[in-house]
Structures are given as structure tokens and as C-alpha cells.
Image (spheres, grey):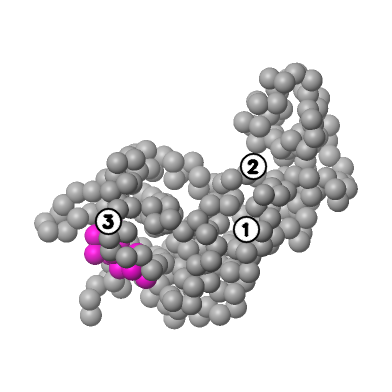
Amino acid sequence: MTAPTVAAFAGLGGQRVWSLMISLFGDLAQGKDDAIDGPVLSAIMALLGVRPEANRVALHRLRNDGWLQSHKVGRISQHSLTPQGRAESAAASPRIYAAPPDLSDDWQLVLTEANGAEDRLREAGFIAVMPRTFVGHGKAKAPEDCVALPGTTPPEWLRRAVEPTSLKEDYEALHRALLSIQTTLPKAEALSPLDIAVLRCLIVHNWRRLVLKHPALPGGLIRADWAGYRCHLLVDDLLAHYPRPTLSDVAKASAPS
């Protein structure tokens, strides 16, 4: 399973080792008392195609950046998220693991005159579609000095206007990779916890690096054939079919036989 799956994602870009490690800890060890033993981490990263020296450099960087902390238990190093790392992982998790939106969800059109309100609208997750004109989720609260109008059936041009065009090719490439593994992966029961940890890391990482680059689109404005939405459906399906293994099961699967 591992080599073909890693190969499916290899050409997508954004596969920096330290970033992969953030995705791994965020998915597998986000709890306060969760820690990954050094040998287990090495086994996972090796299956991801990461060389030992690159693994060490990434650990060093993440410790310096305040994301990870390490301590010795006997002769084995244990690695875990710092409070900062846990907080940032928890903040990103609702977007990463959210269920795909309902394409009939309400949306709203917001008009503003003051330039200052534009920054507040962006911070609140609204999306600019033309000067001083924004769209957002139907229940989102717009600043009081704006005009908010309930959305009706949107035209095709407006649906396309909210899509992050700079990520179009990246989403299309990710969709191809996700579709290829969905059609070739064995059932979860046929995979070891170690394999599933690697699989989930690849899925979460490549999804995370795109979905966190833009606001969440209102469901009522999403095209059913938008690659970002199709990726969301596949990510949700794959993560459900390959549930997160426990750290203890991953450790047992990575132990030398």
C-alpha cells in the first residue's frame, strides 16, 4: 500500500518535511498527553519517503519554532506538540475535518461603503467578489454599517467568482491523486495501523495545505463540479473509511518483528 500511495501524492508539491510532520502530529497526536516515540516517528517518516537526516532537521526546526517538544524516557526520545502547537492544530482542525457543505445552504450578499469594513468582513470570513461587494454564509454576522441581503439562486459567474482561482490546478491535481488511491486502496482491515497513520498523514497534509489558504465557501455558492468540493467529498470519505489508529497500535505495528 505505502509506496504507491506516497507516489500518488509525490508530484503535488508542498511536501516539506517539517510541514508533513505538523500534519502528522495534528492528526495522530493532538491530545494533551499524546506523544510519539522516536522510533515510531522514524518508521512513519521512512514510509513517507523521508531520509533520517531530513527527519532530524525537521524536528530541530519545529522545536525551535515552538511547535514540538522532546524529552527522554529511558533511552528513547518522545515527541509531542507544545501548548502552542496544540492550540494552532486545534484552530485549524474545524476546517480540515469539516463535513462537506450542503450545496443548498443559505448565503448572503453584503455591500459596504467604508473601506474599513472590508478588512472586518475578510476577517469574518466573507469573500470579496467585486469592489465593496462580499458574499458569506447565511448566518454569518456582517458589520452593522453594511447592507446584508439574503442570497437567491446564484448565477454561474458568481459561483465561479468565489472560487480561489490561484488554487484551481492544485485542487485538480489533488483530486486526481485522491481518486487514484480511493480506487486502489484495500479495505482498512487489510492495512496495519502504521499504514493507516501514513495514509491519513498524506491525505490530511495535502488537503490542509490548500483548504487553509482561502475562506470557507458558502455551500449555496459552490459548484458541484468545483475541484475543491470534489476533493472535500473524497477527503471526508477516505478519512471515514480509514479511521485514526491509536498511538499504541501504531507503536506495536512499527516495532521490529
> In the image, 157: left or right of 125?
right
Give the crowd class for mark 3: few <14, some 14-19, many >=20 residues within 10 Å.
Answer: few
Between residues 119 and 223, which one lies in front from this camera angle?
A: 119
Quadrant into which the C terminus falls: bottom left
Q: Please provide percent x and percent y for residue 151.
A: 84, 39
Question: Which residue corresponds to the image point at 70% horizontal and 35% vertical from the top-left?
Answer: 126
Give the Cα distance between marks 2 and 3: 34 Å
Residue interval drawn in magenta: 34-47
Quadrant into which the N terminus falls: bottom left
* Res 105 seen here: no
Q: Which residue is mark 3?
A: 56
Q: From the viewer's perspective, is residue 160 above or below residue 75?
A: above
Between residues 97 and 66, which one lies in front from this camera angle?
A: 66
What predominant SS class does the magenta segment belong to? helix
> In the image, 155: left or right of 145?
right
Question: Which residue corresponds to the image point at 65% horizontal and 26% vertical from the top-left?
Answer: 119
Q: From the viewer's perspective, is residue 254 above or below residue 78?
A: below
What amino acid type should be assigned to the residue bearing mark 2? Pro
Between residues 52 and 5, which one lies in front from this camera angle?
A: 52
Query: In which image quadrant can residue 181 be found?
Result: bottom right
Question: Which residue corresponds to the image point at 12% horizontal and 59% vertical from the top-left?
Answer: 75
* Res 28 seen here: yes
Magenta segment includes 233: no
Q: Which residue is mark 2?
A: 215
Secondary structure found at label 3 = helix
Among numbered discs 2 and 1, the one appearing first in the sequence? 1
Q: Please provide percent x and percent y for residue 144.
A: 73, 20
What amino acid type should be assigned to the residue bearing mark 1? Asp
Of badges 2 and 1, nearer the viewer stands: 1
Give the Cα distance between marks 1 and 3: 29 Å
Give the crowd class for mark 2: few <14, some 14-19, many >=20 residues within 10 Å.
Answer: some
